[in-house]
């Protein structure tokens, strides 16, 4: 596979790097402390085309390929992984899912707003009793004729409060198992839809994560995506692409921590010389850069396979599994290279280490990625 980046890819990298360094970097520690993202920054991300990168311009998006998207995700997550996850959910789960599987009315009404970043979307699969075991949905959507009655609780929802529109997965025909599940576009503000507690998290603290509750919410029939029973296929289909986005987020966190470590190792002196001249530190840097490049190749490969309409289920799972493990390892080593300074907020790597952990958990834990890879191998 040829990864010579085109002029367009290089321009995307430049634009994302510029935005990340000049707009995201200055207040990143403050946002982490305050546990709050900046709505002005979100508006700018929409204006720059980062919120609907793969959506066609016809629906308000940037019309770019998946490779461009992962390049931008890496640059943004290098500096601010909270911005990375908000961007990832909106791009790969919400906008991509709607463009692929929504009907024309749904795209005109919702996608045009979401892809332009005028509103933010959320993806609601997980429940208190259904995380990895996503087929065992307890949220119900009872068919009442011209509407569905939605009841249940979703938890861990990224942008749970900030979002205006949620894609909610729910069980309609329990006797059919995962083939009875549906997915609905649900608007905030509809009667019976409430936002619950905000999670106080280890990392990606500027991204809001909430429980969402549905109590007899009337969802019009036209807000169901796809045929009756398509919901689980929708969830798995969008998550395959989503996992490439999270892999790119993990890659960005690792690459950001490495860059800081390399710089610091040349500045910090011990025993009369920069620590970069100690072989133990050099070996850490060598291993870091090698693992990061291996992760990048897996991420690019998965993105290319998606762009070429190849079966990318296994490639996506491999990229997320590997990049997230690399992010955790590299950020831990980055703190070590910084010594005591690595343990305080000012030097950024402690935040990166906290942010890295979630990439091994959401959009399918590392164990679930291994399960997906093994099932693809054995089928
Ligand atoms: N792609 C396409 N289809 C898939 C698939 C995939 N990656 N994984 C499973 N499927 C299909 C299967 O082919 C099967 O379909 P058929 O019955 O039509 O053949 C159906 O889904 C059920 O699959 P299994 O029989 O394998 O079901 P299972 O219960 O044994 O395993 C699972 C399913 C793979 C573990 C799945 O539940 C899973 O992926 N769990 C993880 C959930 C997850 O990733 N949640 C993320 C929430 S969103 C999020 O986290 C966002 C964020 O943080 C930012
Ligand atoms: P569990 O499924 O209970 O797993 C617990 C442990 O058991 C894990 O180590 C897991 O790997 C292991 N395990 C489970 N089953 C197996 C098995 N079969 N084989 C081997 N090991 C297994 N969800 C959404 O729907 N939308 C979101 O926007 C969203 N955002 C999130 C943001 C954050 C910050 C967090 C923390 C979570 C988010 N999630 C979201 C939920 C996330 O996808 C789930 O937490 C994740 O899928 C794991 O589910 P769980 O937490 O219930 O863990």
Image (tube, grey):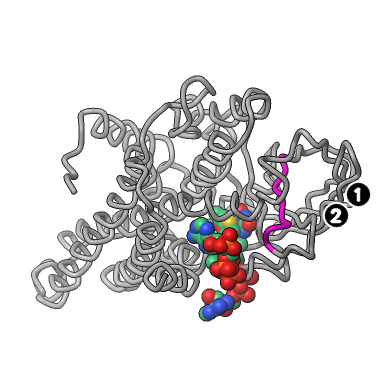
* Residue 333 visible to the viewer: yes
Q: Please state if 270 lies on the left or on the right of 121 as rendered.
A: left
Category of crowding for the residue at label 1, using alpha-carbon neighbours closer than 10 angstroms: few (below 14), some (14–19), many (at least 20):
some
Q: Are marks 1 and 2 in contact (CB under 8 Å)?
A: yes
Mark 1, residue position: 216
Q: Residue at x 89, y 52 (%)?
A: 215
Query: What secondary structure predominates along the stretch shown in magenta?
Result: strand
Q: Is residue 69 above or below residue 107?
A: below
Q: Is residue 343 above or below residue 197?
A: below
Mark 2, residue position: 151
Q: Please state if 259 lies on the left or on the right of 281 as rendered.
A: right
Q: Quadrant of residue 120?
A: top right
Q: Is residue 228 above or below residue 125?
A: above
x, y (%) of residue 25?
Answer: 40, 43
Any atom of ligand 2 within 8 Å of the CB at mark 1? no
**How far is disc 1 from disc 2 in space, using C-alphas?**
5 Å
x, y (%) of residue 36?
Answer: 61, 47
Which range of residues does the magenta coloring cover? 178-185
Mark 1 secondary-structure assignment: strand
- Check the image and name the residue furthest to the top: 58
Q: Residue at x 31, y 67 (%)?
A: 330
Mark 2 secondary-structure assignment: strand
Q: Earlier in the sequence, mark 1 or mark 2?
A: 2
Q: Please state if 305 lies on the left or on the right of 6 as rendered.
A: right
């Amino acid at each position: 596979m040829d990864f010579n980046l085109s002029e367009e890819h290089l321009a995307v990298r430049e634009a994302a790097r510029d935005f990340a360094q000049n707009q995201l970097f200055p207040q990143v520690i403050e946002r982490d402390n305050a546990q709050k993202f900046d709505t002005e920054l979100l508006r700018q991300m929409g204006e720059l085309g980062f919120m609907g990168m793969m959506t066609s311009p016809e629906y308000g998006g940037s019309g770019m390929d998946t490779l461009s998207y992962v390049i931008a995700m890496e640059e943004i997550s290098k500096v601010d992984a909270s911005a990375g996850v908000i961007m990832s959910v909106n791009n790969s789960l919400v906008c991509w899912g709607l463009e692929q599987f929504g009907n024309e009315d749904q795209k005109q009404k919702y996608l045009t707003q979401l892809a332009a970043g005028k509103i933010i979307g959320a993806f609601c699969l997980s429940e208190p009793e259904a995380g990895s075991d996503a087929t065992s949905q307890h949220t119900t959507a009872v068919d009442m004729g011209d509407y569905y009655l939605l009841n249940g609780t979703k938890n861990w929802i990224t942008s749970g409060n900030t979002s205006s529109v949620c894609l909610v997965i729910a069980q309609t025909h329990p006797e059919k198992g995962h083939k009875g599940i549906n997915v609905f576009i649900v608007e905030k503000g509809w009667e019976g839809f409430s936002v619950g507690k905000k999670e106080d998290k280890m990392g990606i603290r500027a991204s809001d994560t909430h429980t969402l509750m549905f109590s007899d919410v009337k969802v019009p029939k036209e807000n169901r995506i796809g045929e009756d029973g398509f919901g689980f296929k929708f969830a798995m289909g969008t998550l395959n692409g989503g996992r490439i986005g999270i892999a790119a987020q993990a890659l960005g966190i690792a690459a950001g921590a490495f860059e800081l470590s390399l710089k610091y190792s040349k500045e910090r002196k011990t025993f009369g010389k920069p620590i970069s001249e100690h072989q133990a530190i050099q070996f850490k840097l060598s291993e870091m850069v090698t693992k990061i490049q291996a992760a990048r190749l897996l991420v690019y490969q998965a993105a290319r396979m998606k762009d070429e309409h190849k079966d990318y289920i296994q490639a996506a799972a491999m990229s997320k599994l590997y990049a997230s493990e690399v992010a955790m390892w590299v950020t831990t080593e980055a703190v070590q290279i910084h010594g005591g300074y690595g343990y305080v907020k000012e030097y950024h790597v402690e935040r990166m280490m906290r942010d890295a952990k979630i990439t091994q958990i959401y959009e399918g834990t590392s164990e679930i990625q291994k399960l997906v890879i093994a099932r693809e191998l054995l089928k």
